[in-house]
Image: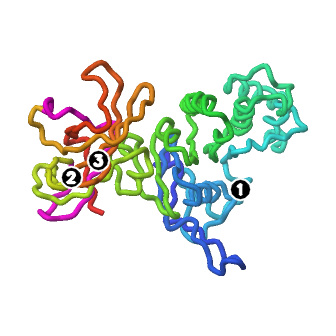
Amino acid sequence: MAPEYAVELRSVSKVFPARRQKGRETTAVNAISLQIAPGEFFTLLGASGCGKTTTLRLIAGFEHPSSGEILLQGMPITNMPPHKRPVNTVFQNYALFPHMSVAQNIAFGLTVQRLPKAERDKRVHEALELVRLPDIANARPSELSGGMQQRVALARALVNRPKLMLLDEPLSALDLKLRQAMRLELKNLQAQVGITFIYVTHDQEEALAMSDRIAVMNGGRVEQVADPASIYNRPANRFVADFIGETNFLPGKVAAWENHRARLAVGRQTVWATADEPLPVGRAVTLVVRPEKVFLTRPEKSNGRLHLQGTVNQVVYLGTDTRYTVRLEDGVALVALARNLNGDGPLYPGETVHVHWHDYDARVLQE
């Protein structure tokens, strides 16, 4: 019977001892539990210092947990040394040997394993074909572009046929256009080889574009684990909502609750938003709505819909979209992102507008 999880972390913590200058220990990873399915593209997402890279190093065996247990395909590996784990890591700087050819770099792990030369050559050729670089076997890393070096690093990891690939911000050294192209390449490659990928990044867009599921980390803890759409549209708390993309936060009070919807008093006006749990009347909450979900209309075209009212404060043209900042009647600023399509034409600073959205696009946070 196949194991249920490719990787499982059970209440794993990592505490670094006190440094002489600071005088206190540091908890980098704080009792996190994760279950990662076989063949999944799983991303650890968070800002610098959140614990994501330490978590990756714990799985790789480069760090030892202070407490908790790590399992690979159902087998405990917590005390297994790194070189015995069927795991390969691709680092941010690629870590290619400059004095070796591409083929020698890729074959390094196979050479250490003392595989016969014919088998090594065959697997190196297959790995280069896989990353679409079949003709550069004799080149040196210094002769390659950043994107090509990144593919060579992937080929070197894949040639060992690991059960698990760990990737520590492997695209961060590339320029924007190449990084965007390599996201698709990497996702397609992962789907082709079917190996479980655990990917570390601080880039929200990268995580949303590539992942089957995302663990959002903060202060050594996991704030939410979900698929990209759920992370973006149904954030578990204010931190996740604020960290993933741009978000409007509006203070309000519950005026009524019915059928998973709450009517909220925001200033002197009321609006509807999705609420997963019943809320008592009078409860202070925060309404969350993404800028692209916000509609702005001139008052004469609001058709009597429940709305907020405000004044356009700033207009920024972004090409396909226009970003509007609206000052509501109670002084709170709200951002709307409108697609530049033919219609009523642009709004201008100083105009009075009605602000509304679909009930299911706004959510209530009880923090």
Amino acid marked by disc 1:
Pro
The kind of secondary structure element at disc 1 is helix
The foreground one among 229 and 107 is 229
> In the picture, residue 81 is in which quadrant?
bottom right
Q: Which mark is residue 82?
A: 1
The kind of secondary structure element at disc 2 is loop
> In the picture, residue 321 is in which quadrant?
top left
Specify whether 204 is left or right of 330: right
Q: For mark 2, does the 10 Å Cα neighbourhood hold few (<14), some (14 to 19), or many (20 or more) residues? A: many
- Spatial CA distance of label 3 from label 1 is 56 Å
Which colouring convention does the figure follow? rainbow
Instruction: List the residue tagged with mark 2.
Output: 275
Residue lying at 57% horizontally and 42% vertically, measured from the top left: 197
Amino acid marked by disc 3:
Arg
Q: For mark 3, does the 10 Å Cα neighbourhood hold few (<14), some (14 to 19), or many (20 or more) residues? A: many
Segment colored magenta? 274-302
Residue lying at 29% horizontally and 40% vertically, measured from the top left: 312
The kind of secondary structure element at disc 3 is strand
Residue 300 shown in magenta: yes
